Image: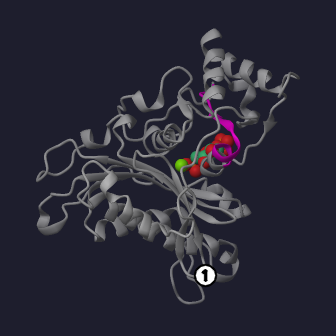
Amino acid sequence: MANKNKTLGEFIIENQTEFKYSSGELSRLINSIRLAAKVVNHEVNKAGLVDILGTAGETNVQGEDQQKLDIYANDVFIKTLTNREIVCGIASEEEDDFITIAGRNEKNDNKYIVLIDPLDGSSNIDVNVSVGTIFSIYRRITPEGTPVTIDDFLQPGNKQVAAGYIVYGTSTMIVYSTGHGVNGFTLNPAIGTYYLSHPNMQFPEDGTIYSVNEGNYVHFPQGVKDYIKYCQKEEEDRPYTSRYIGSLVSDFHRNMIKGGIYMYPNTSKDPKGKLRLLYECNPMAYIAEQSGGKASDGFTRILDIKPTELHQRVPFFCGSKNMVAKAESFMKKA
Ligand code: AHM
Ligand code: MG
């Protein structure tokens, strides 16, 4: 059992050698994300004061220009990663194209790229509901010393070297993996330090929670409709409980702790689904698998999909291993 008083900073240093390339670069990168997450957390917590401090596009009482929080979070993560010169490229859900970072002396000699959804579920902020940041890290595949290309970003999720999320909830937590299981750290806001609160997180193999926007029911594929009816049927541990926050990170986090399945299927309105493969599904699938869970597009393992474009969307079924397998079996039958 890991020491629960351990801080994230200590944990990063102690586990640096576990990582196969172990140059310290990945540790510094995760450290930068930790720092940016603190800054964003501070701003998210002030969101309720927006009427007092000013809304997006206005100037607040201190004379500062206010930004929408998702744009603010995007700027904070990009600036932090750029200023510390530890990545060679960033792609963000908030940006049309990827960003090339030439780094020290314009040498393009950094190894890692980051893909990020800076503030997922941001429509929830206005109503004081949890939001999150999702990040995904790869090694570049183009040679060091040259600028990154689109190929560096279009790698399948099984090539991720690390991924994680920050949930700005009743507590703020960072949950991440570098391929050796999943660990969760809770922020003590009084001193600005994250502590290891959830060592070696395990996705329960089974669960009794299903999370889906059932308002879209009529637009779902038949397999999803059949699976939802299965979840609602009176049998042994069923009907399951329905829980849907509408904020992927929070829904996922709850299901990982309690056992459950999250679904955002394709619909007749959105034939490819809503969620983005690179910024949302791949990192969450990585965390799911690293903790013993499963992630699928209904038929195929998410992490094996070869991306063809930066903002590609994909149907998403993710959670407890046996629940996702069951949902897949309904998809195949239909
Ligand atoms: P966003 O990237 O625009 O914030 O959208 C992603 C969010 C997820 O967090 C959430 O699970 C889903 O969209 C909710 O969508 P819906 O409101 O259609 O159920
Ligand atoms: Mg998003």
**For residue 224, which quarter of the picture?**
top right
Q: Is residue 139 above or below residue 265?
A: below
Q: Quadrant of the N terminus?
A: bottom right
Residue 127 shows in the view: yes
Return the x and y of residue 280 as percentages of the image width and height. Answer: 50, 44
Residue 78 at least partly seen: no
Left-right relation of 45 to 134: right
Residue 185 relative to residue 92: left or right: right
Task: Report the front residue among 9 and 218.
Answer: 9
Q: Secondary structure at mark 1?
A: loop
Q: Residue at x 26, y 42 (%)?
A: 152
Q: Colour scheme of this structure image?
A: one colour
Count how many numbered circles sit on residues in the image.
1
Residue 187 as seen in the image, left or right of residue 24: right
Front residue of this view, candidates 117 and 271 = 117
State whether residue 199 is above or below residue 69. above
- Taking the spot 32% from the left edge, 37% from the top edge, the residue there is 154
Q: Give amino acid for label 1.
A: Ala
Would you call the spot at circle 1 few (<14 residues within 10 Å), some (14-19), or many (20 or more)?
few
Q: Position of residue 330 (x, y in %)?
A: 66, 16
Cβ at disc 1 under 8 Å from ligand 1: no
In the image, farthest residue toward the bottom: 62
In the image, residue 266 lies in the stretch drawn in magenta = yes
- The residue labelled by disc 1 is 190
- On the image, the x and y values in percent for residue 324 come to 62, 27
Residue stretch in magenta? 254-267
Q: Answer with the quarter of the image where residue 126 lies.
A: bottom right
Magenta span contains residue 30:
no
Assign the C terminus to one quadrant of the image: top right
Image coordinates for residue 232, horizontal then vertical, percent: 83, 26
Location of residue 237 by image quarter:
top right
